[in-house]
Amino acid sequence: MLQYHFVTMNFDELFPAETNSPDATVVLGEHIAGALERGDVLALYGDLGAGKTHLVKGIARGFGVDPEEVTSPTFTLIQEYATDPPLYHLDVYRIEHTAELERMGVDEYLHGNGICVVEWPERMEDMLPTHSIRLRLSHVDSVRRRVELVTIGSGE
Ligand code: ADP
Ligand code: MG
């Protein structure tokens, strides 16, 4: 398995970022992988097509997973990668009530020893740990995407 070789950076150095292709978003994801630590929860906000899954592909590649393997687990809700630390990819687009997630034991992923990356985190806002790192992805144009850190309580 590949090992990620990016110098660890912190989130403030990485964002705001703008990418101009899907591949560039994957590369940004690899850099994000270098900034993630065991126990982190990364919440990815953004509309359909904003590039959340491409970012997760890059994060996965950063931990040695072939990005081709990474697709949005819209139907399965959770995809687990046996990396070190383990990587959990959640896509909760279809969730209507967080009780469904509680029944599935999602809390154990959120408060476990792995790294949890969540697409559509607004669907489970009340379950997100206070230490969650929040990123917002947005369309700039057909090939450009902006990725920025969301700071809670900034009065937005
Ligand atoms: P999401 O998970 O947010 O719905 P995806 O990553 O699945 O988004 O899809 C993003 C779509 O936008 C893909 O069709 C991709 O080819 C396209 N795209 C165009 N430019 C970019 C970019 N800069 N970054 C990421 N995706 C891009
Ligand atoms: Mg997606």
Image: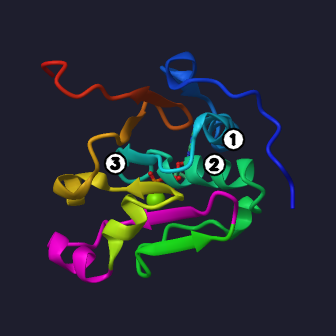
Query: Pointer 1: residues within 10 angstroms few (<14), some, or many (20+)?
Result: many
Tag 1: amino acid = Glu
Please give left or right for residue 52 compared with residue 98 in the image: right
Is any part of residue 150 visible from this angle?
A: yes
Q: Which residue is mark 2?
A: 59
Residue 107: quadrant of the picture: bottom left
> Of the numbered discs in the image, which one, if any, rests on residue 47?
3
First along the sequence among labels 3 and 1: 1
Query: Looking at the rendering, in which quadrant would you find the N terminus?
Result: bottom right
Task: Estimate how packed mark 2 is, as few (under 14), some (14 to 19) or many (20 or more) residues with alpha carbons within 10 Å.
Answer: many
The magenta region covers 83-104
User: How far apart are the alpha carbons under marks 3 and 2?
Assistant: 19 Å
Q: Residue at x 54, y 31 (%)?
A: 144
Q: CA distance from mark 2 to mark 1?
A: 5 Å
Q: Position of residue 96 (x, y in %)?
A: 16, 72
Does the residue tagged 3 have its C-beta within 8 Å of any atom of ligand 1? yes
The answer to whether mark 2 and mark 1 are in CB contact below 8 A is yes
